[in-house]
Amino acid sequence: MKVNYGSSVPISTVDWHGKVSIVFFLRGCPYRCPYCQNHSLLFESNVVDTSVLEAEIKKSRPFVSNVVFSGGEPLMQKDAVKHLAGFAKKIGLLVGIHTNGYYPHVMAELMEEGLVDKFFIDVKAPLDNAEDYAKAIGCKDYTDIHIDPQLVMEKVTESINLVLGNNVELELRTTIIRDFMGSSDDVCNIARSISELTGRKDVVYVLQQGFAENAMLESLRDIKPLSRDEMLELADLTHEFLDNIYVRTKEKGNEKVNFESV
């Protein structure tokens, strides 16, 4: 079986909090997020046999507890991901998948077949604001994206509900980019939309410190990232809607927010 392969990180401690992972970045994505750091994965091809990735998994196996598939958007390559997830499970590894939530039917298949242990879903904008989602996924800046943002929000919503309904571990996260998708209103509206969608306050929600120096959209590349203190201030504002909030920064890594001390 073939896979359009980007790159890998043999040993990572940041892609699944509390666990050591091998991470594969697969090529292709239906979005054109202006702040994307991995945009080289969107336009080039490197088709290899899945045995190449299997060999990497075997090599890292003594040091890791799981495999994470990231991208790009890994679920564009359903058959390859299912094959590799099955291989990982057979040798005793957990499987995590970073996804933009656009492929709920693939997520359903993976859960039905017991091939995934955790989903990490990007919530790029409020789940009830098509204009903001269009901005976040590149509809306003790129002509090669032909996706209805309303449909995108519906698919992300379906994906979140599917995972929660199947009791599979879930992390929702938003990459915070100053002056793009990072204001207090932006973050509060995303948190509110998650709370209203799920009817819960205990969903894990991570605010990720975004770095735009390698962004696909050149005009974003001079934007200064938010500091850890600024990220914590945003987290405090989201507490009106959600309780289980983390901030992920270069300074301190992954931190669960203790709202009594923020």
Image (cartoon, rainbow, N blue to C red):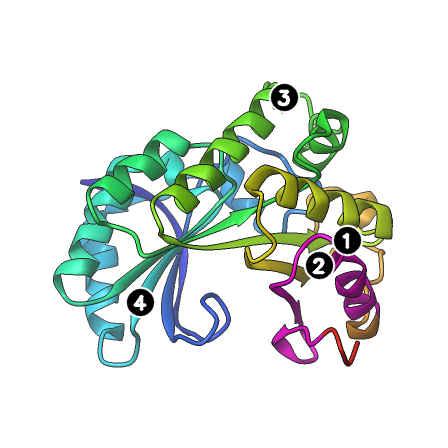
Mark on residue 177? Answer: 1
Of circles 4 and 3, the one toward us is 3
Residue tagged 3: 150
The picture places residue 73, in percent across and down from the top left corner, at 46, 41
Quadrant of residue 225 in the image? bottom right
Helix, strand or loop at label 3? It is: helix
Badge 2 density bin: few <14, some 14–19, many ≥20, Cα 10 Å: many
Q: Is residue 106 above or below residue 167?
A: above
Badge 2 amino acid:
Gly
Q: Residue at x 40, y 75 (%)?
A: 19
Looking at the picture, how far across and down is residue 250, in whole percent? 67, 74
Query: Is residue 166 positioned above or below 15 on the image?
Result: above
Residue drawn at (80%, 45%), measured in percent from left and top?
A: 186
Q: Is residue 10 visible?
A: yes
Residue range highlighted in magenta: 230-258
With respect to residue 205, does 231 lie above or below?
below
User: Which amino acid is tagged 4?
Assistant: Asn
Would you say residue 181 is visible in this rendering? Answer: no
Q: Which mark is residue 210?
A: 2
**Marks 2 and 1 in Cβ contact (< 8 Å):** yes
In primary-sequence order, the first of circles 4 and 1 is 4
Residue 69's disc is none
Q: Compare marks 4 and 3 and give the one earlier in the sequence.
A: 4
Amino acid type indicated by mark 1: Ile
Q: Which quadrant would residue 133 be assigned to in this image? A: top right
**Residue type indicated by callout 3:** Gln
Q: Is residue 217 magenta?
A: no
Q: Determine which residue is flagged by label 4.
A: 66
